[in-house]
Structures are given as structure tokens and as C-alpha cells.
């Protein structure tokens, strides 16, 4: 897993640590650690599916995803980040492969993300809204077949 943060001081460093924890949880397939990166009322917007709201629901979604797929070669590149005192926005890209746990060919992914983050009282940041889509039409594990 390679992570390429664009900001390395202050709040940017705290946000970078959040994204490192989130990516590590995804690569390790740990739904509890993944959901812990979200606010209690955080919202996840997966492609082609209705929004998933609340840390508990995010954890259930992640458990289903991580139960089916492993992530390999995950690389993240931060494209833009804007920070206020209590709210931040991040735009970034991720690429790698989803590997079916029951065997089969890896499914490459090349995704773009946009997040809204909220600063917590302890100075840490959590994700309030996480949305993404694929840059490669038809080659996503989220593609719905008609």
C-alpha cells in the first residue's frame, strides 16, 4: 500500500493519518477499523447503490465487501485538500486490484473520491461523507448488471 499525502503539517498531518488508517483497514479487510474512520452519522455513497448512513451500517457494508474481496497493490494520490477550522474536503484517487476471495481473476480498480471530513474535539478528523466512482467504465466490483 502506498499513500501519497499532499499536506504534511498540522491538521493536514492528522488528516493524512486518518487516510492511512482507513487504507490499512481496507487492505487488511478490517470492517471495524474501517468504520472507525467515520463519524457516528457518517455517510458512504458507493456507486450504483443507495447511501449507507451511520458507523454501524458502514461497518456492515465493509464486512460484506471485505468478506468477498481482498485489496492488492492499493495506491492513493491526494489531488486536492481544503481545510477550515472544523470542516475539510479531500479529492483523491486510488488504484489497485480487488481479488476475489473465492478465487478468480483480480478486478483492477481506478477510482476517484471526494470526502467531507469533520474535526473532532481532540483535534483528530473523521469522515462525514465518502463518495467515489470508477474511472474505468464496466470494470468495477460495483457495476450493476442489467
Image (tube, rainbow, N blue to C red):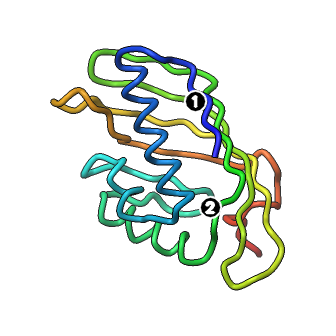
The image position of residue 133, as x and y in percent, is 66, 48
Within-10-Å neighbours for mark 2: few <14, some 14–19, many 20+: few
Task: Pick whichever of labels 1 and 2 is earlier in the sequence.
Answer: 2
Horizontal relation, residue 43 to residue 104: left or right: left
Which one is closest to the eye, mark 1 or mark 2?
Answer: 1
User: Which residue is depicted at the point 82% across and 61% down?
Assistant: 138
- Kindly indicate whether the residue at mark 2 contacts the one at mark 1 (C-beta within 8 angstroms): no
Residue sitting at the far bottom: 102
| Residue tagged 2 | 48
Image: 50 above or below 10: below
User: Which residue is depicted at the point 67% across and 64% down?
Assistant: 142
The image position of residue 60, as x and y in percent, is 39, 71
The image position of residue 66, as x and y in percent, is 54, 70
* Residue nearest the observer in this picture, 49 or 21: 21
Q: Quadrant of the C terminus?
A: bottom right
Distance from disc 1 to disc 2, alpha carbons, whole Å, reads 20 Å
Horizontal relation, residue 146 to residue 50: left or right: right
Image: 22 above or below 34: above
Within-10-Å neighbours for mark 1: few <14, some 14–19, many 20+: some
* Residue nearest the observer in this picture, 88 or 146: 88
Residue 50's mark? Answer: none
Element marked by disc 1: strand
User: Which residue is depicted at the point 79% across and 64% down?
Assistant: 107
The image position of residue 86, as x and y in percent, is 27, 22
Element marked by disc 2: loop
* Residue nearest the observer in this picture, 61 or 100: 100
**Image quarter of residue 87:** top left
| Residue tagged 1 | 91
Amino acid at each position: 500500500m502506498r499513500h501519497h499525502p499532499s499536506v504534511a503539517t498540522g491538521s493536514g498531518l492528522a488528516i493524512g493519518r486518518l487516510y492511512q488508517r482507513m487504507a490499512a483497514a481496507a487492505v487488511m479487510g478490517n470492517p471495524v477499523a474501517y468504520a472507525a474512520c467515520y463519524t457516528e452519522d457518517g455517510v458512504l455513497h458507493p456507486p450504483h447503490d443507495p447511501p449507507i448512513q451511520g458507523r454501524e451500517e458502514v461497518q456492515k457494508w465493509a464486512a460484506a465487501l471485505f468478506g468477498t474481496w481482498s485489496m492488492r497493490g492499493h495506491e492513493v494520490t491526494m489531488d486536492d485538500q481544503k481545510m477550515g477550522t472544523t470542516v475539510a474536503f479531500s479529492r483523491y484517487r486510488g488504484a489497485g486490484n480487488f481479488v476475489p476471495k473465492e478465487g478468480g481473476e483480480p478486478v483492477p480498480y481506478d477510482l476517484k473520491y471526494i470526502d467531507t471530513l469533520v474535526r473532532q474535539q481532540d483535534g483528530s478528523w473523521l469522515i462525514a461523507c465518502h463518495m467515489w466512482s470508477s474511472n474505468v467504465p464496466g470494470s468495477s466490483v460495483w457495476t450493476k448488471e442489467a
